[in-house]
Image (cartoon, rainbow, N blue to C red):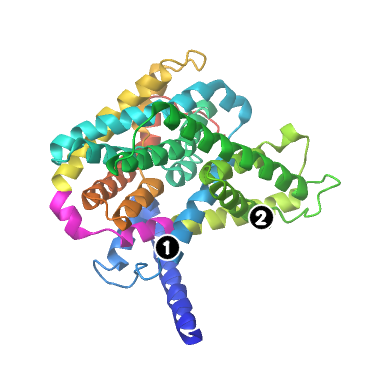
Amino acid sequence: MEVNIAALTEQIMELIAIVIVSGIICIKLSVKLHLPDTVLFIIAGIIIGPELLGLVSFKDFPVANQLVLTFGAAYILYDGGREIQLSILNKVKVSVALLSTIGVIVSAFITAFFAQRLLNLDFMYALLLGSAIASTDPSVLVPLFKTINISPKLKQTIISESAFNDAAGAIMTFAVIGLLAGSSFSITSSIWELAKTAGGGILVGGILGYFSTLLVSEHKFGFFTGHKGEIVVAAVLGAYFIATHLGVSGFMAVFVVGIVFGNIELLNLTIEEEGYNLHLNFKEVLVRILRIMIFVILGTQMSFNVLSEYWKGALLVVLSLVFIARPVSVLFSVLIDRRAAWSFREILYLMWTRETGVIPAALAGMLLSMQIPHAQVISAVTFMAIIITLSFQASTAKYVAKILKLEESEIY
């Protein structure tokens, strides 16, 4: 038994080394080719994965695969939370709430309408597809909008939506699975489930974030001053574990941990400069490694057989998601929010910003493992959505901001 464990450990270490080196090469190439590194990560995953060279496959290591995807998404969400300024978020809270709830529902139903016709699916399975790909991706949006000079209001709305809509997308997906299994549907119970999942995650993240910040601050209880990087990793892991153990949103919890760390001045706390700078350097390297791991692994899971069978219908469904479902869901959400005072150009930019990534991929993988009927089709559409939105929307986000004259002179 010990020999087997040692052999498996060595194999996992080998896979991780290959993935990271491939990712570093992609980062260098992305600068020369002027392409988003995430797109090249996925392509690298396809090349080194079982479909082509066969150098990397995590099929025999489901725990390692799930750990990378879950912790990676969680830590990147924490990083996104750090970018949020509560004073600005307060001004757009209605828009964020509606985009993360009503927007997800509208997007899922419109996508389902087209999926039913283009892929010849029963409506409930089409709705399952629409629900699975309804949420946006913080692992792409958080790093992307650190480099784009747009207003804090617009930037933080996009990042916050990507954190909050994960819960709504997952809840809707599980609700449709329940209906397919014969369960009854209740709007009241669904709203309560969403409120409990999101609210519980906020509560867990707020409590753990406060005490973690206190421990690394210059307060009299700052027993771990100078070790912010280490405590943050523990806080992210702990917040996710506690929240999911309590049946609430782990991703929401880690996002709120990030918000607390990013707004310590509101808590009248300070962190010594050396420890803060050390944490920033550590965080940037860890986020880079996690992004490489997440998207290269996603690329290794791409199935040419599934894509070749459904690519035409999948492409059309994704185009309907990008050019119809997203714009309509944005209009339903932001026009109600008078306080945010959205301009027409800002609304257009929100319509274009709709990247698909880790959470939809994880949901698609879950449907495959559960052997849900038509899960292969849902998987094909999900990967098509990832490729298209990362290739075209993420890569043109800065250019579109420039065209719409939304760029500002300072990066916030």
Crowd tier of the residue under label 2, counting other residues whose Cα lies within 10 Å: few below 14, some 14–19, many 20 or above? some
- Is residue 296 rendered magenta in the image? yes
Q: In the picture, which quadrant includes the C terminus?
A: top right
Label 1 Cα neighbours within 10 Å, binned few <14 / some 14-19 / many ≥20: some
The x and y percentages for residue 124 are 24, 37
Q: Is residue 230 left or right of residue 29?
A: right
- Can see residue 272? no
Q: Which residues are magenta?
A: 293-310
Q: Amino acid at mark 2?
A: Gly
Amino acid type indicated by mark 1: Asn
Q: Which mark is residue 65?
A: 1
Is 146 drawn above or below residue 31 in the view shown?
A: above
Q: Residue at x 51, y 27 (%)?
A: 151
Q: From the viewer's perspective, tell me whether residue 351 is left or right of residue 84.
A: left
Relative to 313, residue 232 above or below: below
> Residue 37 or 298: which is nearer the viewer?
298
- Asked if the residue at tag 2 contacts the one at tag 1, i.e. Cβ–Cβ closer than 8 Å, the answer is no
Residue at the spot 31% in from the left edge and 26% down from the top edge: 327
Q: Which mark is on residue 229?
A: 2
- Of 145 and 407, nearer the camera is 145
Displayed quadrant of residue 334:
top left
Residue plotted at (51% across, 31% down): 195
Q: Secondary structure at mark 1?
A: helix
Q: Residue furthest top?
A: 338
Compared to residue 129, the image places residue 293 above or below, namely below
Residue 221 among those drawn in magenta: no
